[in-house]
Amino acid sequence: MAQASKNARTSSATQKFFCSCGGEIKMKTIFESGKVKNVAECEKCKRTERRPSDFK
């Protein structure tokens, strides 16, 4: 049986982050003052940070 190339193999690993309030963290893209920013925001308490790991 032929082997699949390493580029043909797919693995979908998604990680979910949760805020200390219990809400789920979603990444959002914001266009602000001519620049595109990626921001992590809690759905429940609306707290925003630069990346999901900053919520700890």
Image (tube, rainbow, N blue to C red):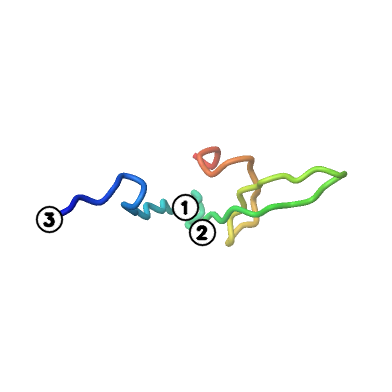
Q: Residue furthest right?
A: 33
The image quadrant where one finds the N terminus is bottom left
Which residue does the image show at 63% across and 43% down from the upper left?
A: 49
- Tell me if 13 is positioned left or right of 38 in this view: left
| Among the two numbered marks 1 and 2 on one chain, the one whose residue lies closer to the N terminus | 1
Which of 21/29 is in front?
29
Instruction: Identify the element where label 3 is drawn.
Output: loop
Which of 55/2 is in front?
2
Inspect the image, locate mark 2, and give the three-letter code of the amino acid beneath it: Gly
Q: 44 above or below 30?
A: below
Between the C-alphas of marks 1 and 2, the distance is 6 Å
Between the C-alphas of marks 2 and 3, the distance is 47 Å
Question: Are circles 1 and 2 on residues that touch, CB within 8 Å?
Answer: yes
Which of 25/6 is in front?
6
Which residue does the image show at 66% across and 46% down from the upper left?
A: 38
Which of 36/27 is in front?
36
| Among the two numbered marks 2 and 3 on one chain, the one whose residue lies closer to the N terminus | 3
Q: In front: mark 2 or mark 3? A: 3
Q: Residues within 10 Å of mark 3 (few under 14, many from 20)?
A: few
Residue 42 screen position, x and y as percent: 58, 55
Residue that badge 3 annotates: 1
| Among the two numbered marks 1 and 3 on one chain, the one whose residue lies closer to the N terminus | 3
Residue that badge 2 annotates: 23
Inspect the image, locate mark 1, and give the three-letter code of the amino acid beneath it: Phe
Residue that badge 1 annotates: 18
Q: Residue furthest left?
A: 1
Q: In front: mark 1 or mark 3? A: 3
